[in-house]
Each structure stands twice: as C-alpha cells, then as structure tokens.
Amino acid sequence: MSSTSFNDPYDASVLRDGLFADRSAFVSGAGSGIGRAIVLRLVQLGMHVFGTGRRAEMLEETANLTKDMAGAFTYKPCNVRETDAIEALVREAGESRGIDLLVNNAGGQFFAPAAEISRRGWDAVIDLNLNAVFTVTKAAYPYLRTSRGSVASISLSGVDRGSMGLAHSIAARAGVLGMTRSLALEWAKDGIRLNCIAPGTVVTEGLAGEAARPMLERLVEATPMGIPTSVEEVAELVAYLASPAGRLMTGQLIQIDGAAHLGPGLHMIAAE
Ligand SMILES: CCCCCCCCCCC/C=C/C(=O)SCCNC(=O)CCNC(=O)[C@H](O)C(C)(C)COP(=O)(O)OP(=O)(O)OC[C@H]1O[C@@H](n2cnc3c(N)ncnc32)[C@H](O)[C@@H]1OP(=O)(O)O
Ligand SMILES: NC(=O)C1=CN([C@@H]2O[C@H](COP(=O)(O)OP(=O)(O)OC[C@H]3O[C@@H](n4cnc5c(N)ncnc54)[C@H](OP(=O)(O)O)[C@@H]3O)[C@@H](O)[C@H]2O)C=CC1
C-alpha cells in the first residue's frame, strides 16, 4: 500500500484556458465529490455551468469555489428522481443558455448482497441511476440537438462484468451503457455524442461515508496500479470528451480505474 493520502489533489489539467468560452453545461450532483470537480474544471475552462443536486448548501459551496474563475456557475436544488421537476429544470437551463454538455453524475447506491436487496431498495437504485438518467437526457435532447453537443454519464468500473454487493447499481449502469450506445446511434445524425466514464475507487465523501478506512485500503490494493482515481482526472476526461478532440468519441465506455476492471479488481470485494 503506498503512503499516498487517498485524496491528494492531482494536477490532471492538459486542456487550454478559454476552451469552453460561450459554452454551457448541465451537471447533476454538482454539490460534492466528482460532480463538484467537474464543475470546477469546466468553469475554469470558461464554461457556464448549471448545476443541481438536493442540498442547496453544497451547491452554494461549489458556487463559492468558482468565484474567480473564467466561466460561471449557477444552480438550483432538485431531486433528479422527481421527473416533472427535473424535466422543468433542464428546460429552464436549456432555454436560458442552451446545453452543449450534459453530465449525468448524480447517483449512488448502498452495498448489499443481492439476497438482501428488497424490491423497494432495488427500485430506488434503478430509479436514481437509470430512470433519472433517461429522464434528464431526453429532456436535454432538444438543446443538445441545437448545439450538436455531448453527454457524459458517470458509471462504475466493472460495469461490463458485474460486481459483488452492487447488483442493483451495476444493472442500472449497464442499462445506462446500453442507452448510451443506442442513443449514440439514434442521435449521431444530430451530431450528438454520448459516452460513459467509469471511475474505479474515488475517495469522495460519498464513498468514504460508506466504507471504513480498511475497506478503502482494500479497494486500492485491488487496483492493479495501486492508486485511487482522483476527481480531477475524471473531470479532465469529461472536458476532453466535450472538446473538439473528442469529435469522434461516441458510444464508448471509458474505465478510468488503474486497470481495476481487469481484475482481481474491485468487483470481487464484498461489502462486509
Ligand atoms: C462498502 C464497500 C464495498 C465494496 C464494494 C467495492 C466497489 C467499489 C467501487 C464502487 C464505488 C462507488 C462509489 C459510489 O457510488 S460513491 C457515492 C456513494 N453514495 C451513495 O451511494 C449514497 C447514495 N444513496 C442513496 O441516495 C440512497 O441510499 C438510495 C438512492 C440508494 C436509496 O434512497 P431512498 O431514500 O429511496 O431509500 P430509502 O432509505 O427510502 O430505502 C429504500 C429501500 O432501500 C433499502 N435500503 C436502503 N439502504 C439499504 C442497505 N444498506 N441495505 C439493504 N437495503 C437498503 C431500504 O431498506 C428500503 O427498502 P424497504 O422499504 O424494503 O426496507
Ligand atoms: N466514489 C467512487 O468511488 C465512485 C463513484 N462513482 C459514481 O460517481 C458519481 C458521483 O459520486 P461521488 O462524487 O463519489 O459521491 P457523492 O455522494 O459525493 O456524489 C453524489 C452526488 O449526487 C447527488 N445526488 C444523489 N442523489 C440525488 C438525487 N436524487 N437528486 C439529485 N442529486 C442527487 C448528491 O447530492 P445531494 O446529496 O445533495 O443530492 C451528490 O452531490 C455517482 O454516480 C457515483 O455512484 C462511480 C465510481 C466510483
């Protein structure tokens, strides 16, 4: 186990300043972890980002962090599982500035063996990680068509091979991957590109709240490269895919995980 602190900031920036001047993004789960890092990088690159999440105070903190940056961040709290409300919010953002980039990042689950997942628990995770992604993506379609924009959906490393303790979440993310590939075909004629980005272990508040430190150490040890994924490198990949360099990237699953998905991998670690 390396002595690297789990969440040291990592300078992953390779894209040029001003890259996204006059461009707009919609980011869900913008108040913490990976979503916040994505917002910060996009705003740094000049974008106007509209963010959402349930907790206003977290979104406000993200806003404070963007104050001196080139672009801008505005937000409104919303639960992505409330279909009418989130559709209205996407419309509001789209009508005010358009949407060049949609980032489906809000998500999460509880870790449990499948035999202990109730039907309500299953439905809750599918609702958050699959149904809401479809709702938001469909609501953004008219604006993405106008901008010939792109979509990045945050997935999970191991989505293509299964993961212990995560049957519900992997099923949902595999659904998003299928949706992404299908829409990459359907919407190619509109110039819209859609990709899934699958991080390995990212030591955000969200994961650290679930797993004790020894579990985090096991997660990192199960990563062949022995390094957790930083929020900054996920953010840079999102920005790259939205940039002109990503012009032909669509329908992809990109696992940014230090080879965790190739095994022995995170997918074999059971919740304890
Ligand atoms: C611990 C480490 C294991 C190792 C695994 C290795 C894999 C590593 C890589 C994975 C990396 C992933 C990281 C992340 O995703 S970080 C983000 C983490 N944060 C979260 O996930 C929090 C988000 N969770 C939620 O928002 C909610 O839990 C959720 C949407 C999933 C449900 O919300 P809701 O409010 O609808 O839920 P309720 O409380 O009303 O419950 C609904 C039913 O679900 C059942 N439930 C809830 N928790 C559990 C549990 N822990 N075990 C079993 N069942 C659970 C609950 O009982 C309800 O059902 P019933 O009414 O039938 O009881
Ligand atoms: N950390 C990790 O190791 C990995 C994480 N991921 C995925 O990356 C994404 C971001 O996770 P991460 O940053 O780590 O964890 P966080 O818990 O910090 O982020 C989840 C974000 O989603 C928001 N969110 C959750 N439920 C809803 C909802 N119903 N409506 C609106 N917003 C919601 C939360 O905000 P609020 O609570 O205010 O609503 C929060 O900002 C998730 O999809 C996660 O599953 C994927 C691979 C690995």
Image: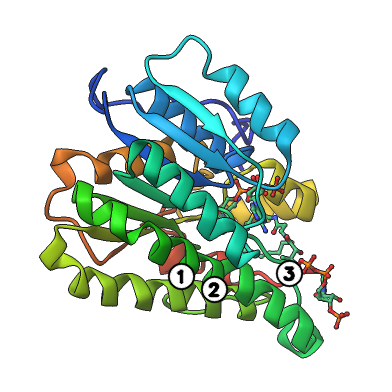
Q: Quadrant of residue 84?
A: bottom right
Q: Could you tell me the amino acid type at mark 2?
A: Asn
Residue at the limit of the structure toward the top, as seen here:
68
Q: In this rendering, which labeled residue sits more in front, label 3 or label 1?
A: 1
Asked if the residue under mark 2 is in contact with the one under mark 3, i.e. CB atoms within 8 Å, the reply is no
Task: Point out which mark residue 134 bears.
Answer: 1
Q: Is residue 78 left or right of residue 170?
A: right
Quadrant position of the N terminus in the picture? top right
Q: Earlier in the sequence, mark 3 or mark 1?
A: 3
Asked if the residue under mark 2 is in contact with the one under mark 1, i.e. CB atoms within 8 Å, the reply is yes
Q: Nearer the viewer, residue 3 or 32?
A: 32
Ligand 1 under 8 Å from disc 3 Cβ: yes
Residue 195: image x %, image y %? 31, 60
The residue identified by callout 3 is 111
Q: Earlier in the sequence, mark 3 or mark 2?
A: 3
Q: Nearer the viewer, residue 140 or 186?
A: 140
- Measure the C-alpha gap from mark 1 to mark 2: 5 Å
**Crowdedness of circle 3 by 10 Å Cα count: few (<14), some, many (20+)?**
some
Task: Point out which mark residue 131 bears.
Answer: 2
**Crowdedness of circle 1 by 10 Å Cα count: few (<14), some, many (20+)?**
some
How is the protein colored in the picture? rainbow
Quadrant position of the C terminus in the picture? bottom right
Residue 119: image x %, image y %? 76, 88
Residue 183: image x %, image y %? 27, 72
